[in-house]
Image: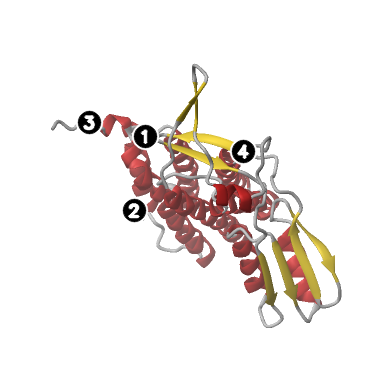
Amino acid sequence: MKRSVIRHGPATLIVSLPSKWAKERGLSPGSEVDVEPQGNKLIITTEEGMVTHELHLDVSTLSPFMITRLLARSYQKGYDLMHLHYTDRESMHTIREKTTELLGFDIVEEDKNNCTIQALAKSINIDFDNALRRSFYRVLENARICQEAYEKNDTEALEGIWESDLDVNKMTYFCLRTLAKGMVSGHEVFVLYHLIETLEDLGDEIKKLARDLVKSKLKNSFVEKKLKIMVELTENVINFFYSPKKEGAVKVFDLVAELNSLEDLPKNISKELLAAVIHLHRIADYLYVYAGMRLDTIKELKSEVKA
């Protein structure tokens, strides 16, 4: 749809909004819209007349784990109202717990076999970039706690990672929902979605690593070394993500290889520590994704193409 640009005054240019679009959203003279420049695009958004997406589901035959996945995915996909039917108290307890991870949502109606979960506000006082940064640094903090607690044999701190990972869930869920709602635009949105999904998985993997370290009874120098590399790798990945430079990419790839290396792996290693090593490999693979996905943004690699 093409629109003509009209001059208004000596320095102002005006373009009209599509009439149908404006009517559907209840816009009238004096209404406010958000205008965001993005390269050669101008993104215009409004909260007026936003469509409420509802979901009506019977979850009585689902396991608690499946219910948590359903709630997380429905939130991430942008649903504003979720009407759920269930037949047992365990399901209700699961729904209550998971709802605490959905920023801006709460249970507004509830009886013996039904509940309604609703977005309480059209917007939350946190922006996408801030939420994403908080997700990254919460993951990094959990990685550090994991490494330091293992060295000190602090099982309480290791167990605490399960709770602090909820912050990662909240922030990454919110970011995914923001993308689904179209509040972030650009040709790299699908890449961002994948990277945020990976970040949530990374947080889960560190949480599982901490669980297996708690189960292990004897400290292991090989695992101690790998935990230090994990923390260093996580720090470098975050730095590279926000400031992509060739030197940073090389460092990340080297650390990924170092974390994945099985050289000096003890022959007699407990199954708990072997499980921890497997988690460390998965963590390396998740962090590798960030380096690979950002290589095209390194300014040092860009060159002018001559016609």
- Res 111 visible: yes
Task: Give how far across and how far down residue 288 sits, in percent.
Answer: 39, 49
Q: Which residue is mark 2?
A: 263
Mark 3 vs mark 4: in front: 4
On screen, residue 127 above or below 212:
above
Q: Is residue 137 left or right of residue 249?
A: right
Q: Type of residue at label 3?
A: Ser
Q: Residues within 10 Å of mark 4 (few under 14, many from 20)?
A: few
Mark 2 vs mark 4: in front: 4
Cβ atoms at labels 4 and 1 below 8 Å apart:
no
Q: Residues within 10 Å of mark 3 (few under 14, many from 20)?
A: few
Q: Type of residue at label 1?
A: Gly
Lower position in the chain sequence, tag 3 or tag 4: 4
Numbered-mark total: 4
**Disc sitting over residue 33 in the figure:** 4
Q: Which residue is mark 1?
A: 248
Q: Which residue is mark 3?
A: 303
Instruction: Name the residue nearer the viewer: 262 or 193.
Output: 193
Mark 2 → mark 4, Cα distance in angstroms: 58 Å
